[in-house]
Image (spheres, rainbow, N blue to C red):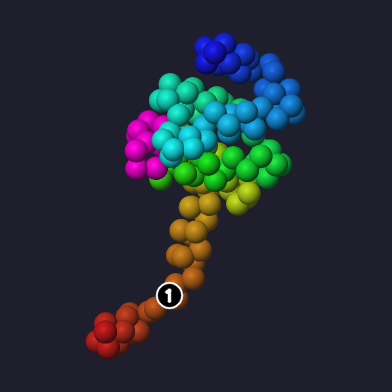
Amino acid sequence: MLPEVVRELQRTDLFEVFLDHHILDAVRAWLEPLPDGSLPLYDIRREMFNILAKLPIDTDNLREVKIGPLVTFYTRAPRETNDIKKIAQSCITKWSRPILNISDSYRDVRLAEHAVDLSQIHSQPVLDASQRHITSLTN
């Protein structure tokens, strides 16, 4: 059944419809650990995380379904593979940006870093030669 589910969930034109019809509940059910504590099959985890990474999930979807704690569990699960941990971590990063009001644009990040650098430069007092000499003697 997994290939059929994946084939349908990869239809990008239906992403909004899927989210409106609570597809995240089904994805969460596929990813939840089994009653004995074991994880679902690797192929299931890999495919479901690939789908989660592609879906345009917003904060309302996250609050409604509570899939965030499950994805966080996978980032910390000792028996999980590194590739799934990496996808889970990228999902968390992507989902937390709007909550924390952080831009995902590299340009915005660089401008913010540059503004911090400039503020540090301008906040330092300018010392003349005699003050620098006195400061160097006291330190």
- Camera-nearest residue between 110 and 33: 33
Q: On the picture, is 135 further left or further right than 56?
A: left
- Camera-nearest residue between 96 and 46: 46
Do we see residue 23 in this rendering? Answer: yes
Residue at x 58%, y 16% (from the top left corner): 5
> Is 132 located above or below residue 63 in the figure?
below
Residue 81: image quadrant is top left
Q: Amino acid at mark 1?
A: Val
Residue at x 41%, y 45% (from the top left corner): 76
Residue at x 73%, y 22% (from the top left corner): 17
Element assignment for label 1: loop
Q: Which residue is mark 1?
A: 126
Q: Quadrant of the N terminus?
A: top right
Judge the density around disc 1: few (<14), some (14-19), many (≥20) Cα neighbours within 10 Å.
few
Q: Which segment did they paint magenta?
A: 77-86
> Is 124 located above or below residue 104 in the figure?
below
81 magenta-colored: yes
> Is 56 located above or below residue 60 in the figure?
above
